[in-house]
Image: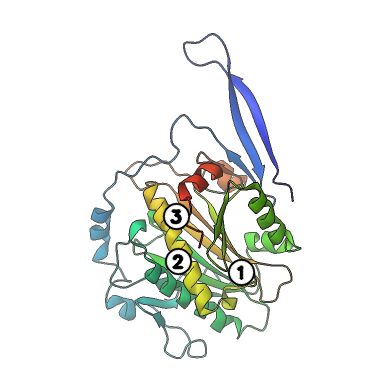
Amino acid sequence: MELRSRRLVGATIPPGANDPVPTEVEVRWDPLTGHSSRILTAAVQLIPPQDFDLAAVAEETRAGCPFCGERVDELTPRLPPEVWPEGRIRRGEAVLFPNILTYAQHAAVSVYSPHEHFLPLDRMTHRLVADNLWTQVTFVRAVSERLPEPAWGSVNANHMLPSGSSLFHPHLQGSVDPVPTTMQALLARGADGRFEKYLEAERLAGPRYLGSTGRIEWLASFAPIAPGELRALVPGACSPADLDDDAVEELGAGIATALGLYAELGLQSCNMALYGAPSGTAGYWLNLRIACRSNLRPLYRSDATYFERLHWEGAVDLSPEDLAERAGDRFRR
């Protein structure tokens, strides 16, 4: 498989100068979807370091939060008994319930803990992440078994307000539909051995391959959609419903490791998507994408521009190779 890229060179005359100097941007094409991405050499950081008091925002939003304390049972809906007789799925401190915003035919929200309204990335422990992921995997499995059509399940996150979250309290969101999202369809369309070829190409290339935690492979994305993008590939699974308890534990540990890396890089907010296809989809590997968003501040620049939203093309100034170097051996067992 070719990891396709092209360097585009232009020129500009800086203020106060007479002679032109070269400018450069690198365009890369994602091996799994065909999306293109631009690696920039920016004069300033597109996401400035964090300097905002997130703890103060947490206190401002805590009083009316429907996910806090006993309110999570009082103010959130329950699953139908045919899906889950107890109405809510629980594991450790995590609690899952239906999403009142109907993003999918079957949609769920799960909080890491009703007692943890403020969870910056450096406090997202393996235990909290794995237990919350388990509730979502269990939800996808319970719903998928009852759908008359093949189920397209995903587990997603909007962590902190810049990521698109409408509530400050950290949570995951799960979706199960009889039809794929655009990205799920693009990934499944390439399920013809492409996942294996992509992994092998990155192993041979070296600089972006982060390693294996056992059953799960981690990489810095070759053509990222958003800053700091990491990918995980799960051979042998197509849907979140295919993950057994050991795989949930391993993936939860990997996600927590990724969030800890982001915290060390001075980042606060991120999105995550675990893209499932119907169980048994030939050649498909369950795969995860996690990437950063702008840090919260009174006047902050959104990282989603016309490139990302309207051209479907990421433009980032943290190169995948630099990200992989910062990650070091965190994802090697």
Residue neighbourhood size for the residue with mark 1, other residues' Cα within 10 Å, grouped as few (<14), some (14–19), many (≥20):
many
User: For the residue carrying disc 3, how many other residues have a C-alpha within 10 Å: few (<14), some (14-19), or many (20+)?
Assistant: many
The amino acid marked with disc number 3 is Cys
Nearer the N terminus, badge 2 or badge 1? Answer: 2
Q: Residue at x 28, y 53 (%)?
A: 54
Which secondary structure, mark 3? strand
Residue 50, compared with residue 97, is above or below; it is: above
The reply to whether discs 2 and 3 touch (Cβ–Cβ < 8 Å) is no
Which label number is shown at residue 270? 3
Nearer-the-camera pick, 105 or 333 = 333
| Residue 19, percent from left and from top | 56, 10
Residue name at image x 60 percent, y 81 percent: 144
Residue 314 seen by the camera: yes
Q: On the image, numbered disc 2 is attached to which residue? A: 253
Question: Is 239 situated left or right of 128 in this image?
Answer: right
Under circle 2, the secondary element is helix
- The location of residue 78, given as percent across then percent down, is 42, 83
Amino acid carrying label 1: it is: Gly
Q: Is residue 227 visible?
A: no
Q: Residue furthest top?
A: 18
Give the numbered dot on residue 163. none
Residue 97: which quarter of the image?
A: bottom left
